[in-house]
Amino acid sequence: MLRLLMIGAGGIGGYYSARLLDAGHQAVLTARGAHLHALAENGLTVRYEGRERHHRPDVCDHQKLVTRYKLDDFDVIVIALKATATASVVDELGAWLKQGRVPVLSLQNGVDNEPLLAEAIGADRVIGGLAVRIGGHIARPGVIEAEGVAQIVMGAWPKVIARSDTRNPLLETLAAAFNGAGIPTTLSDNIRYELWRKLVINNGVNPLSALAGLDTRSLTHHPEFSKIVYGMMAETVEASKADGVNLEKKDLDEMFELISNFNAIKTSMLVDKEKGRPLELDSIAGAVLRRCELLGIDAPYTTTIYALLQSESRLEG
């Protein structure tokens, strides 16, 4: 039985927690605001593929977490918050996370979460991960709606250097537990490469979807918007070279084909915009632009969409 702490029981974290709870594993969830209150009062409800799962796991905010639990109460800590919250989590929970050797798995968008965690707790405790082909959001406090294959790819960050890495046995345990719970999970020897491949998709569709108000299929099958999607994805491929990942055109074409054939889903950034929440713009498009600047190359598509969303945000504010 796996003992898991899910920091951030939103659309992604809530769905994966429910699958693991179904399989008999233990999970403690963190949340805040109305969602936290609803989880504590009524439990967690997850709707997926016509089925509804309901559980009553332990749930708390970060303040109660550090007083109620010890780090070693868990086998793994999973962070499924928005990437914009990673820095604040490190500030709030950094001292608590240093009180043991439990690895921390990030299931977040972007390529900057693992470096932040590595700086706070040591790179040898960081597991990189990504949720693939899943759409999930909080339909209302306490209720999650999810769709898609909902795969997970994870691995020792930034990549496996030696088979003697102390994270490897846990990774095998996690993969077995996740797969057994109906979460298709694979391990990667080079997780940073996988994270960048996902960023190619995220930068291609997330910012533009928030600006245009369109789902992924509408964007990728539109005669003009599809060109912008491909252009932003191509700029992300070039940006990867700043991290020594060196994605190629085949990666670009594979990712474009993948998102073009995926379900017509609202991106997380579009959902956040509709709900009036902060966008992960800096974690996605901003990450690409910072690296393009380091490389001394232009990224006109990403620069334009980034600037338009920033301007729109200032006007709405």
Image (spheres, rainbow, N blue to C red):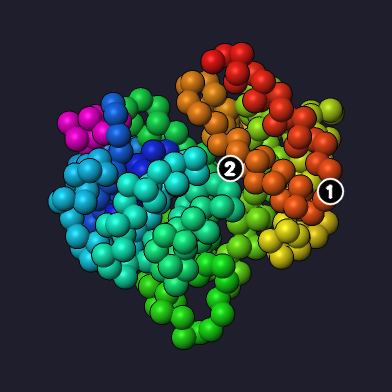
Point out residue 77 in the picture as x, y percentages from the top left corner.
34, 58
In this view, the residue in front, 66 or 48, is: 66
Element at badge 2?
Answer: helix
Point out residue 203 in the picture as x, y percentages from the top left corner.
68, 41
Label of residue 297 in the image: 1
Q: Is residue 211 visible?
A: no
The crowding category of the residue bearing disc 1, from other C-alpha atoms within 10 Å (few below 14, some 14 to 19, many at least 20), is: few
* Residue depicted at x 77% and y 40%: 232
Q: Quadrant of residue 261?
A: top right
Point out residue 316 in the picture as x, y percentages from the top left corner.
57, 14
Q: Which residues are magenta?
A: 35-43
Q: Main secondary structure of the magenta part?
A: helix
Identify whether 208 is placed above or below 91. above
The crowding category of the residue bearing disc 2, from other C-alpha atoms within 10 Å (few below 14, some 14 to 19, many at least 20), is: many
Identify whether 134 is placed above or below 225. below
* Residue depicted at x 60% and y 18%: 314
In this view, the residue in front, 251 or 95, is: 95
Point out residue 14 in the picture as x, y percentages from the top left corner.
36, 43
On screen, residue 292 versus residue 6, left or right, reads right
Residue type (three-letter) at the residue carrying disc 1: Ile
Q: Does the stretch in magenta take in 42?
A: yes
Q: Is residue 277 visible?
A: yes
| Tag 2 residue | 283
